[in-house]
Image (cartoon, rainbow, N blue to C red):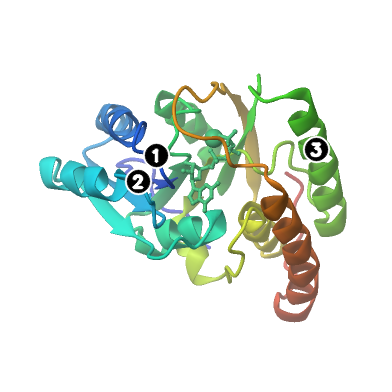
Amino acid sequence: MTKPSLNPLRLTVFFPCYNEEANVERTTEKALAACRDLTNDFEIIIVDDGSKDRTAKLADDLAAKYPEVRAVHNNPNLGYGGALQRGFREATKDWVFYTDGDGQFDFGEIKKLLPLLENHDIVSAYRMNRKDSLMRKLNAFCWGTLVNLVFGLNIRDIDCAFKIFPRSLFDHIQMRSMGALIDTEILAQSKYLGYKIGQLGVNHYARTAGEQSGANLKVIARAFLELFRLRRQIKATTTPHTRQSS
Ligand SMILES: Nc1nc2c(ncn2[C@@H]2O[C@H](COP(=O)(O)OP(=O)(O)OP(=O)(O)O)[C@@H](O)[C@H]2O)c(=O)[nH]1
Ligand SMILES: [Mg+2]
């Protein structure tokens, strides 16, 4: 692949929002400030995932107020994977960054990822101080170990919602995951295609508003079903390239 230029940086930033009426304005304004600090050539996409609260209206108002902001809507709700797929498909700039819409990450840390892109094709961050319960951290550890083993990956925090990709990657991979497996689906295919994945620690903050929903049983069950499907799919459809270590 030919890596896009980092100077000037052409950047899409997007974040999924499901019932984030308490967060979407603050998140968008933080994204705007961070992007303006990095480049003149950027777009911000709010992916409203069929929210039942006022998120859709607030996202449309933000898009009307700021020319760099666009709001897209999945209707009905398609799940976390469906929301990320939409963001990657809507992106038009050379580099695509995504994070969560609930304010648990600091957009200001995007600039820490960029130097790694000199020697890597993708950067996948890990949470240095994950603000979740011990049980949730334990579940994530077991899940991460399983996924790394199954796909021959070496990713420290695969579901960390703080990653940057060249947009062209999405012309070469298939995204089918509608749930939490989406990150694994993207990184496993990238690795098989020979993309070099860099990793770096970022801060994680507790949710200050809105409702927790990231680890309910439905989400976990769907992730397991998708894991087995993805294993079959990758074996059947992706031609392995030169394997590189991350
Ligand atoms: N849970 C959930 N989140 C979605 C969905 N679609 C988009 N999102 C957004 O995806 C991001 C991550 O979801 P969260 O519920 O915050 O998941 P998490 O950070 O792992 O967990 P908590 O914040 O602790 O619940 C948030 O910005 C959500 O608004 C969906 O269908 N379900
Ligand atoms: Mg969250």
Closer to the camera: disc 2 or disc 1?
A: 2
Label 1, secondary structure: give it: loop
Q: Which mark is residue 139?
A: 3
Q: Is mark 3 within 8 Å of ligand 1?
A: no
Identify the residue at horizontal 44%, vertical 59% (top origin).
Answer: 88
Q: Is mark 1 within 8 Å of ligand 1?
A: yes
Quadrant of image for the C terminus: top right
Lower sequence index among marks 2 and 1 = 1
Query: Would you say residue 108 is visible in this rendering?
Result: yes
Identify the residue at horizontal 58%, vertical 63% (top origin).
Answer: 178
Name the quadrant containing residue 212.
top right
Q: Amino acid at mark 1?
A: Glu
Separation of disc 1 and disc 3 at Cα? Answer: 25 Å
Closer to the camera: disc 2 or disc 3?
A: 2
Identify the residue at horizontal 39%, vertical 51% (top origin).
Answer: 51
Badge 3 density bin: few <14, some 14–19, many ≥20, Cα 10 Å: some
The residue where tag 1 is placed is: 20
Picture layout, residue 113 above or below residue 77: above
From the top left corner, tell me how far across and down residue 57 is, in percent.
Answer: 23, 48
Q: Residue 213 vs residue 155: left or right?
A: left
Q: Considering depth in this image, is 180 or 170 the residue closer to the camera? A: 180
Separation of disc 2 and disc 1 at Cα? Answer: 8 Å
Picture layout, residue 116 above or below residue 171: above
The residue where tag 2 is placed is: 53
Which residue occupies the extreme bottom position in the image? 236
From the top left corner, tell me how far across and down residue 5 is, in percent.
Answer: 38, 48
Lower sequence index among marks 2 and 3 = 2
Q: Amino acid at mark 2?
A: Asp
Lower sequence index among marks 1 and 3 = 1
Label 3, secondary structure: give it: helix
